[in-house]
């Protein structure tokens, strides 16, 4: 999987259980991360949060970035989004170097934290991007309404975020990003704060949308089950400092059903296989 | 109306009635019943007037029972109650409006710019340490005895209160919300308009209610120190004649002016902040 020579090549494990994703293999590279490094100074001491990470995401791929808490997943994603300056390395999106502070219209971002605007209704939150792009109210009404429908939020258009459940809020956040039709979707543990049941529902919603529209997705999570359910590839990061550890192909059949998938034998085999590697990282975190 | 509410209103009315009765007749009764040394001075009508006298003064100052008719009485008195109220209300309103508008603008600008905040920080702290009332004679010297000096005084008092709150509000804006807006294509100005301003608004309003009272205080103090018209001037004139009931009339009118302004600000607040739980209306 490594396109760029780097000092820490990662072993790539292929677990081909079924054929899928013709799109992904043939397609061009959308995100290229090369030797990415990030150092932070906190309380006067410098420490390395992300250490020489390289990977690629191809057109239409759904890549999960998996690692223990605090290993630098959000940091990596924020650098890819251009929200955070890098300490070293390069990031290319469609062969253009990512520059901090410059917004790429092709990229959509869903935050780990709830970042809905509490003073805007559901409708106004979802329509935000269109509104500030100067699209007239009448012109955006139809798109907003269909997004609300797609998210299963019919009847809540006029509600303020605080009146919604956590799952509904995250659906609004997802739609607020998707309505701008990004080709590349960066997601930072968007369902991390949800209970198991709601999480599965959200997986279903997201998979339905993704299987229809096939955005290129980079999805950060520390939940292995979630990563297997959603992703076509899992990139495993080590505990702090974040380094690339392994790269797994998840060749499960699509369309996937998040609930029945969890009961299947393939899911179990993948889970225990990756868990073995991940387990080491969790144990390392605990020792720190 | 639920029962507990009726009980509360009944208690409120009972307390009001008791206060009025003691105020009106308490001094006479205690003079008749108690030895001279124990008669409470605080109830002496010379100092605190009494409701019936206040009502008479109100009718007289307000030209409401003048034999020559309302219009002629108003014309004959340059500082009649209604004109004085209007002047004070008007100056308070403008002082409040200019003060809060400039406070909000300055708070937003300095709150969003670290550079400007650090440059101006010490000056603002220093200026804020001056008791504003100490500046009133200076303001009157500069702007004269007319309305302008009262508006300027109210401005001085209101500006800093609103400025500090807006400043804190603009700093407390959720950084991820700003990042989210940027990622959806918002420019610096659009971020300010659609994220910073609405999210700082709760902080701004927290200062606007006290700011209204401060504006009124500023105007009245200005009128005490040097004015031709207004409720403050009315009080100073009544003091010169040792007329407690006329002072009381002006004080009560000020109370109503204060309530009126607070109601206006509060209803604006509950509309603009209707997304917050405490301002939720039945939906
Ligand atoms: N602005 C910052 N200044 C200093 N240290 C930071 C900063 N942001 C993150 N860090 C540190 O960098 C490390 C990686 O943080 P990051 O948020 O990327 O972790 P994460 O993998 O996303 O964790 P989680 O799964 O809990 O969200 C952490 O140790 C964190 O404390
Ligand atoms: Mg994170």
Image (cartoon, coloured by chain):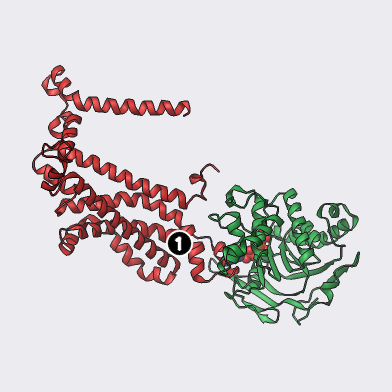
Chain colours: A green, B red
Residue B127 rendering spot, x and y as whole percentages: 28, 63
Instruction: Please tell me in which quarter of the rendered image ligand 2 is found.
Output: bottom right
Q: Position of residue A261 (x, y in %)?
A: 85, 55
The count of marks equals 1
Relative horizontal placement of residue B45, taking residue B3 as reference (left or right): left
Taking the image as shown, residue A118 lies to the left or right of residue A7, namely left
Q: Residues within 10 Å of mark 1 (few under 14, many from 20)?
A: many
Q: Examine the rendered structure and indicate whether residue A203 appears above or below residue B246.
A: below
> Image height check: is B15 above or below B72?
above
**In which quadrant of the rendered view does residue A131 lie?**
bottom right
Residue at image position (19%, 61%) is: B139
Q: Quadrant of the C terminus of chain A?
A: bottom right
Measured from the top left, where is residue A30 in percent x and y?
Answer: 73, 76
Does the rendering let one see residue A288? no
Apparent side of residue A11 relative to residue B253 in the rendered image (left or right): right
| Residue located at (38% from left, 64% from top) | B105
> Disc 1 on helix, strand or loop?
helix
**Image quadrant where residue A173 sits:** bottom right
Residue B177 place in picture, x, y as percent: 56, 62
- The vertical placement of A6 against B211, above or below, is below
Q: Which residue is mark 1?
A: B170
Of A63 and B252, the residue lying toward us: B252
Please tell me which residue is depicted at 74% across the width and 79% down the height of the picture: A7
User: Which chain is home to disc 1?
Assistant: B
Q: Is residue B218 left or right of residue A39?
A: left
* Residue B123 seen by the camera: yes
A226 or A144, which is in the foreground? A144
User: Which residue occupies the extreme top position in the image?
Assistant: B33
Q: Is mark 1 within 8 Å of ligand 1?
A: no
**Observer-nearest residue: B71 or A209?**
B71
> In the picture, which quadrant includes the N terminus of chain A?
bottom right
């Amino acid at each position: 999987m490594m396109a760029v020579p780097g000092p820490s090549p990662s072993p790539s494990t292929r677990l081909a259980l079924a054929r899928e994703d013709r799109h992904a293999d043939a397609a061009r590279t959308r995100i290229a991360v090369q030797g990415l490094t990030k150092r932070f100074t906190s309380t006067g001491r410098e420490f390395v949060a992300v250490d020489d990470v390289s990977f690629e995401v191809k057109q239409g791929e759904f890549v999960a970035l998996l690692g223990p808490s605090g290993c630098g997943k959000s940091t990596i994603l924020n650098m890819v989004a251009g929200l955070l300056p890098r300490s070293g390395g390069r990031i290319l999106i469609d062969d253009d170097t990512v520059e901090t502070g410059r917004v790429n219209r092709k990229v959509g971002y869903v935050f780990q934290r709830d970042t809905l605007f509490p003073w805007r209704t559901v409708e106004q939150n979802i329509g935000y991007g269109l509104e500030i792009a100067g699209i007239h109210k009448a012109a955006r009404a139809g798109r907003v309404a269909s997004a609300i429908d797609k998210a299963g939020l019919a009847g809540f258009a006029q509600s303020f975020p605080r009146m919604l459940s956590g799952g509904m809020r995250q659906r609004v956040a997802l739609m607020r990003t998707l309505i701008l039709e990004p080709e590349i979707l960066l997601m930072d543990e968007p369902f991390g704060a949800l209970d198991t049941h709601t999480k599965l529902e959200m997986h279903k919603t997201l998979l339905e949308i993704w299987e229809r529209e096939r955005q290129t997705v980079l999805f950060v999570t520390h939940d292995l089950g979630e990563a297997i359910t959603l992703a076509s590839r899992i990139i495993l990061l080590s505990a702090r400092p974040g380094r690339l550890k392994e790269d797994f192909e998840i060749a499960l059949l699509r369309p996937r059903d998040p609930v029945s998938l969890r009961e299947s034998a393939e899911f179990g085999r993948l889970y225990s296989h990756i868990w073995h590697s991940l387990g080491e990282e969790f144990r390392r975190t605990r020792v720190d | 109306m639920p029962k507990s509410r009726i009980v509360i209103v009944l208690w409120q009315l009972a307390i009001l009635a008791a206060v009025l009765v003691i105020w009106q007749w308490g001094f006479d009764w205690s003079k008749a019943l108690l030895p001279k040394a124990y008669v409470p001075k605080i109830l002496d009508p010379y100092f605190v007037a009494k409701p019936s006298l206040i009502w008479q003064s109100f009718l007289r100052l307000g030209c409401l029972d003048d034999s020559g008719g309302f219009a002629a009485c108003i014309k004959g008195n340059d500082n009649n109650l209604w004109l004085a109220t209007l002047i004070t209300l008007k100056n308070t309103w403008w002082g409040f409006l200019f003060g809060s508008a400039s406070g909000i603008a300055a708070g937003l600008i300095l709150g969003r710019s670290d550079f400007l905040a650090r440059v101006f920080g010490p000056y603002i702290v220093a200026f804020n340490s001056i008791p504003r009332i100490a500046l009133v004679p200076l303001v009157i010297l500069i702007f004269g005895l007319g309305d302008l000096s009262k508006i300027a005084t109210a401005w001085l008092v209101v500006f800093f209160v609103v400025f500090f709150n807006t400043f804190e509000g603009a700093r407390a804006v959720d950084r991820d919300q700003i990042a989210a807006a940027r990622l959806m294509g918002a420019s610096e100005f659009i971020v300010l308009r659609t994220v910073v301003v609405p999210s700082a608004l709760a902080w701004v309003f927290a200062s606007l209610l006290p700011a209204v009272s401060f504006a009124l205080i500023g105007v009245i103090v200005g009128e005490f120190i040097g004015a031709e018209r207004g409720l403050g001037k009315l009080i100073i004139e009544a003091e010169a004649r040792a007329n407690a009931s006329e002072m009381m009339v002006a004080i009560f009118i000020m109370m109503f002016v204060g309530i009126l302004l607070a109601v206006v600000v509060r209803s604006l607040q509950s509309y603009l902040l209707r997304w917050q739980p405490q301002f939720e209306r039945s939906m």
